[in-house]
Amino acid sequence: MEADGGEVKHILLAKFREGISDEQIDEYIKEYANLVNLVPSMKAFKWGKDVSAENLHQGFTHVFESTFESTQGVAEYVSHPHHVEYANKLLPQFEKVIVVDYKPTKVQL
């Protein structure tokens, strides 16, 4: 297996700016999901809103998860023209954002 091989999850935590309607947020999410059809290295997309009872979200309200086959796939995504165009449109809509990439690891018991 190559050094960067193996599934990679790209996680984006976000809080949208005040004044952005639910309808606008829905449109941004649809455009985000459509990147799966435009960026070959992006294999899957899921999203959700915070529902935690622990109240440790620090103001983040939305979670976006993209799946890639490798770290190289994430790099291709980040520089892909469709992603760059979309990111330039989406990122200004956030009050706060965190992005984390990780390789899922199974625990051996």
Image (cartoon, grey):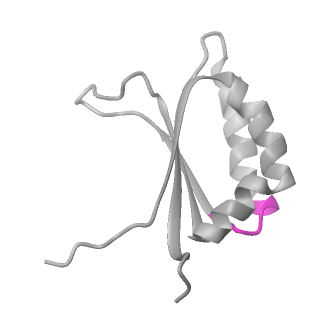
Q: Is residue 103 left or right of residue 31?
A: left
* Image position, residue 47 (x, y; %): 53, 46
Residue at x 67%, y 39% (from the top left corner): 29
Residue drawn at 81 percent across, 60 percent down: 38
Question: Vertical placement of 24 versus 18: above or below?
Answer: below
Count of all numbered marks drawn on residues in the image: 0
Q: Quadrant of the C terminus?
A: bottom left
Q: Is residue 64 above or below residue 107?
A: above
Q: Which residue lies most toward the left here?
A: 109
Question: x and y percent of residue 42 in the render?
Answer: 68, 64
Q: Residue at x 74, y 63 (%)?
A: 76
Residue 40 shown in magenta: yes
State the residue lying farthest toward the front.
3
Residue lying at the far top in this picture: please name it. Answer: 19
Residue 58: which quarter of the image? top left
- Magenta stretch bounds: 37-43
Q: For the point 66% across and 28% down, which residue is it?
A: 25
